Structures are given as C-alpha cells and as structure tokens.
Amino acid sequence: MINRFRIHNEFLDVRIHRKGAELCSVKNTDQFEFIWQSGPVWQRHAPNLFPIVGSLLDHEYSYNSKIIQLTHHGFARDLDFDILHQSEHSICFILQQNQDTYQSYPFNFTLLITYTLNENTLEQAFRVINKDTKMMPVSFGGHPAFNVKAIDEYEIQFEYNEDVQANTLEGPYISDSKVDVIKGNKIPLNYLTFDRDALVFQDLKSDWVKLVHKSSTHAVKVDISDFPYLGIWSKPGAPFVCIEPWQGVADLVSHNKDISEKEGIILLETGKEIIKSFTMEFSS
C-alpha cells in the first residue's frame, strides 16, 4: 500500500501522508523545505483536526445525556485515509466512520481533505458531510508547522492593524485570561512567545496572516478568511511555528461539557455539508 503521495508543479513539490491525510513536505525549486520535518520535540508535521479542535474537559463530552470519551484534537490525525482521486496538481483524501470512530463519535460522516496546487500556493480544503439521521456536532481545522531558522529572526504579520487580545491556555483548555501580543499588525517572535502554549485569536479583521523572516524573502502567507479562529503555536525554543486556521477551539475552563454548546461547534443537519479551505503561499 502506498502511504506517501506527491503532487507538484513548476513551483512546488508537495508530499502528503495517507495517515491523517497529513501534509509532510513542501519544497520549492531550490529544495528549500518549508514544513517541519518532525522530531523528538514534536513528532508531527501538519495534523488535521477532526471532529473537534483542541481538548475537551477531561477528554469527554456530553451528548444526549451520555458521557463520551474523545481524544485531543479528535481521531482523524491518527487514521489512514483512502484516496478518492489524484492528479498531478491535486489530491483528495476521504475518511468515513467505522466501528472504532463510532465509539468516540457516534455519527455517520464523510470527511474529505483536498490539496490543490496553483503556482506557489497550496490550498487545503475540508468538506464534511452529515450522513446520519440526526444533527451532527462538528469542528475541524489545520495545524501546519513551518520551519524557522531561529525564532527570534521571524515575526508574524497581519493584513491589518489588530486590536484584539489573544486567549491563552490553562493546561490544555482556554482560560479566562487574555494577553496583548499584537503590536500594530505584527507579533515579534522570541523564545518566550509561546511559554504559555498557543495564542488563540478570534474576531480578527485580517483575512491573512504571514510568517516572515525579517532579513530575507522567506515567508509563508496563510489565508484564514474562511475560519473564525486562529491558533499560533510553537514548542518553546523549537525551530518551527504553526499557523492554524480553526473552526472551533479547545473547551473553555468553564464549559459544561455539552458538545452542542461547545465554542465554535457547527450543528450540521442531516444530509447537509460544510466546505471550508485555507491557502498557504510560499516564498523564499
């Protein structure tokens, strides 16, 4: 069985794993690798989050008065997808419910993740279909990690000046406290930026955010316009930065565990579907 797939054009060479439909490599014509290549500090590249984003309180939720266990960021990132179709410039992965997923997520679903190249831009699209006879609560998101040389040589740039604060985490959950980290339209990065874990934003004016090397042309621009939440994260001192468009967030510390009332959850009606996508534009 083939477990690693390739799409490419004259600008970029892209590799994706079957497991998790996870983007694992993006190289340009100079063989510059944009994607974090896994390692002891963090053994993933760009996991796909489904059917939740973040952690549930005590890793469980309430549905129809029943308590159900579900792991951090959901199960899709750890499962093998099938290939629905592939061309030179595009590939579509598909995941559907099975006996194992039904134990932690008792719904009949189809999840399609499609990657499409257009010059130096890679689009990643999520399509979720409710095949069940009941309402399906769902959220999803991306988690791509981009290589950096030394984190203090980089900054995050937003399309516009932003005056929103970032939510921080209390353990794996969204805390009630917020911090000011955006200076105008930038977040200067250093080795302490993520000492309290991820920075989580909502109500941003900007449709895109960019990871920029301050003294070269190396940059990754991520269009986040389809998603209401944005996570920015790295392991303290690690040579990568994640820019994460999210439909949903981890549970707030005050959440009641009812998944239908979870922040960012979509209640998808029977037979309905939702499609959202983000793009990554690579420059070096």
Image: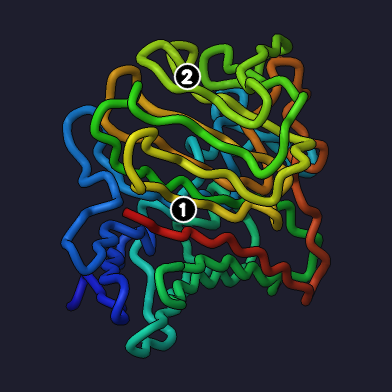
**Residue nearer the viewer, 27 or 97:** 27
Q: Earlier in the sequence, mark 2 or mark 1?
A: 1
Q: Amino acid at mark 2?
A: Asp
Q: Amino acid at mark 1?
A: Asn
Q: Is residue 61 left or right of residue 111?
A: right
Instruction: Pick whichever, 219 or 44, lies toward us.
Output: 219
Q: In x, y percent, where is residue 267?
A: 80, 55
Quadrant housing the C terminus: bottom left
Q: Residue at x 56, y 37 (%)?
A: 157
| Left or right position of 243 against 39 | right
* Quadrant position of residue 130: bottom right
Q: Mark 2 and 1 residues: CB-CB less than 8 Å, in contact? A: no
Image-based side of 117 in relation to 110, left or right: left
Q: Secondary structure at mark 1?
A: loop
Q: Who is closer to the viewer here, 277 or 274?
A: 277
Residue 44: image x %, image y %? 29, 43
Residue at 22% in and 54% down: 33
Residue linked to disc 2: 197
CA gap, disc 2 to disc 1? 19 Å
The residue lying furthest to the front in this view is: 215
Relative to 70, is 246 on the left or the right? right
Q: Which residue is mark 1?
A: 48
Q: Secondary structure at mark 2?
A: loop
- Which quadrant of the figure has residue 261? top right
Residue 116, image x, y percentages: 46, 76
Instruction: Say which quadrant the N terminus sits in.
Output: bottom left
